[in-house]
Image (cartoon, helix red, strand yellow):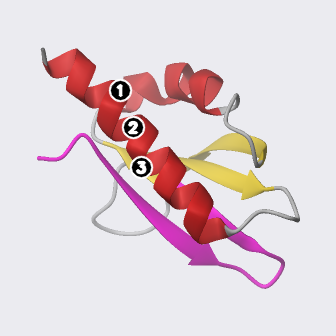
Amino acid sequence: MLPYRSEIRNSPKEQTLKIYLSDTSLDNQLKSLLENIHGIRIIEVQESISRNRAKENLTIYLKEDISINILKEKIDAFLENYFEKIDI
């Protein structure tokens, strides 16, 4: 099982990024680390209501002038590096 999955979500108000972690005990720790990435306005730990997903997720709201695709690439690279260090 992969340690995380990220996806772009569209809502009526704005696009967000959702991060689903296999180990939800890491939610708050990763939230604190991700908040330092340029382009993130706010991160919330939310309960997931969809089927076949982790029970919680990190919902990331972007600043207005940031491309969601570029920010997703940055976050994915950060998470890959983070989990690679843990696996060593």
Residue at position x 51%, y 27% in the image = 30
Occupied quadrant, residue 81: top left
Residue at position x 64%, y 68% in the image = 68
- Horizontal and vertical percent position of residue 22: 27, 40
Query: Label 2's element?
Result: helix
- Amino acid type indicated by mark 3: Asp
Q: Mark 1 highlights which residue?
A: 82
Is residue 3 on the magenta stretch?
yes
Occupied quadrant, residue 87: top left
Q: Do the residues labelled 3 and 2 touch (CB within 8 Å)?
A: yes
**Which residue range is magenta in the image?**
1-18
Q: Mark 2 highlights which residue?
A: 79
Q: Which of 58 and 87 is in front in this view?
A: 87
- Amino acid type indicated by mark 2: Leu
Query: Label 1's element?
Result: helix
Q: Is residue 5 left or right of residue 50?
A: left
Pointer 2 local density, CA inside 10 Å: few below 14, some 14–19, many at least 20: some
